[in-house]
Image (spheres, grey):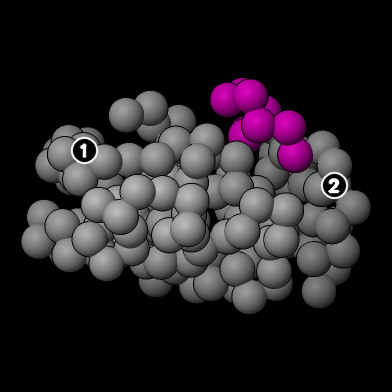
Amino acid sequence: MDIRSLTPDYAVSPQIDLADLAAIKEAGFVTIIDNRPDGEIPPHLHTQAMRAAAEAAGLTFVANPVIGGALTMANVQAQAAAIAEATGPILAYCASGNRSSICWALSQAGTRPTDELIALPAQHGYNLEGLRQQIDVLARG
C-alpha cells in the first residue's frame, strides 16, 4: 500500500487490497473513495466486495468510478460531495492515484489557489499542469 497525502485530510493511492483496510483504518482514515471501475480490476476487488469489507471495518465507502480519459463533471461533483460529507481523513484510490488526484483538484477548484491544486499532487509525481485552465474555469463558477 502506497498512501500519498495531498493534504492532511485527503490522500491518494494506487489500488488497495482487502487486506489493507485494517491498516487504512488504523492510519486514521474514515472514508475511502474508489475511483476505479470494476472492469479494470479482478472480481475480488470489485466495488461490492470492497464496500462490504470497508464497511465491516468501520469505514465509509464511496464508489465514484472514473474511466481513464473519460472523466465527467458527474465524477467531479461526486468527489466533491464525498469530500464535503466526510467526517475525517479520506483515502481515494485508482490504478496509480492520478485519477484520484485529478478528481480532487477539479472538485476543489475555487476553494484553494490553482497553483496549490497543481503543486500538491506534483509532489507525488502527478502532473496536473494540463488541467490549469479547467481548474480556473471551475473556480470562476
Percent x, y for residue 85? 39, 71
Q: Quadrant of the C terminus?
A: bottom right
- Residue 24 visible, this orientation: no
Q: Which residues are magenta?
A: 120-128
Amino acid on which the number 2 mark rests in the picture = Arg
Which residue is painted at 48% across and 51% down in the image? 40
- What secondary structure is marked by label 1? helix
Disc 2 and disc 1 in contact, CB within 8 angstroms: no
Residue 48 in sight: yes
Which residue is at a point 43% across and 60% down the rendered structure image?
A: 38
- Tell me which amino acid carries mark 1: Asp
Q: CA distance from mark 2 to mark 1?
A: 33 Å
Determine which of the numbered discs, if any, sits on residue 132 in the image: 2
Residue at the (25%, 57%) spot, across then down: 50
Number of marks drawn: 2
In screen coordinates, is 67 left or right of 55? right
Describe the element under mark 2 as helix, strand or loop.
Answer: helix
Q: Which residue is mark 1?
A: 20
Please report whichever mark, 2 or 1, sits nearer to the chain's N-terminal start. Answer: 1
Q: Residues within 10 Å of mark 2 (few under 14, many from 20)?
A: some
Percent across and percent down for residue 82 are 44, 68
Point out residue 63 in the picture as x, y percentages from the top left corner: 41, 66
Indicate left or right for 53 with 12 as reference.
left
* Above or below, 46 relative to 24: below
